Image: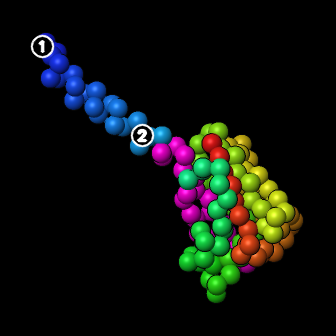
Amino acid sequence: MKFTIAAIIPLMVVAVSATPLEVRQSNQVTVALSNDQSGAYASATFQADDTDKSIFSLFSGTSVGAGGTVKATAAQLTNFAQSINCVIKNNDATIGTFTAQKTYLDLDGSPHTAIPINLDNAEIRCRV
């Protein structure tokens, strides 16, 4: 079978148009918050574009944001690029950093207790 220009061009168009979607998806990150006292769990997916994202805006309509306050005991990366780096700050104080090798944060800082932390003023910044 001979390949002609008419047969090659559609293949090239498909290959080129698939690349931007793949790149966009690799810049997305999913972070989950859990509250071990209430049993609430929710996740949010957003672009890892090196800008601050309000945790209240991401989670206020979820079970961890019930009652108008976002409270969680732990955070976890659940979908991410291998080069991900995320920093969570609460009231301008760094709570912790996520990477592909460190995907879990105990937000209260005590592994033996589950104390929900108010994250209404918290922000997360992720970059690939």
Relative to 66, 37 lies left or right: right
Residue 18 visible to the viewer? yes
Q: Residue furthest bottom?
A: 67
Residue 1 - label? 1
Q: Residue furthest top?
A: 2
Residue 56 at x, y percent in the picture? 65, 73
Is residue 11 covered in magenta? no
Residue 40 at x, y percent in the picture? 63, 75
Q: Residue at x 65, y 39 (%)?
A: 83
Q: Secondary structure at mark 2?
A: helix
Where 39 falls versus 80 (above or below)?
A: below
Residue assigned mark 2: 20
Q: Residue at x 82, y 64 (%)?
A: 92
Residue nearest the observer in this picture, 102 or 27: 27
Q: Quadrant of residue 64?
A: bottom right
Quadrant placement of the N terminus? top left
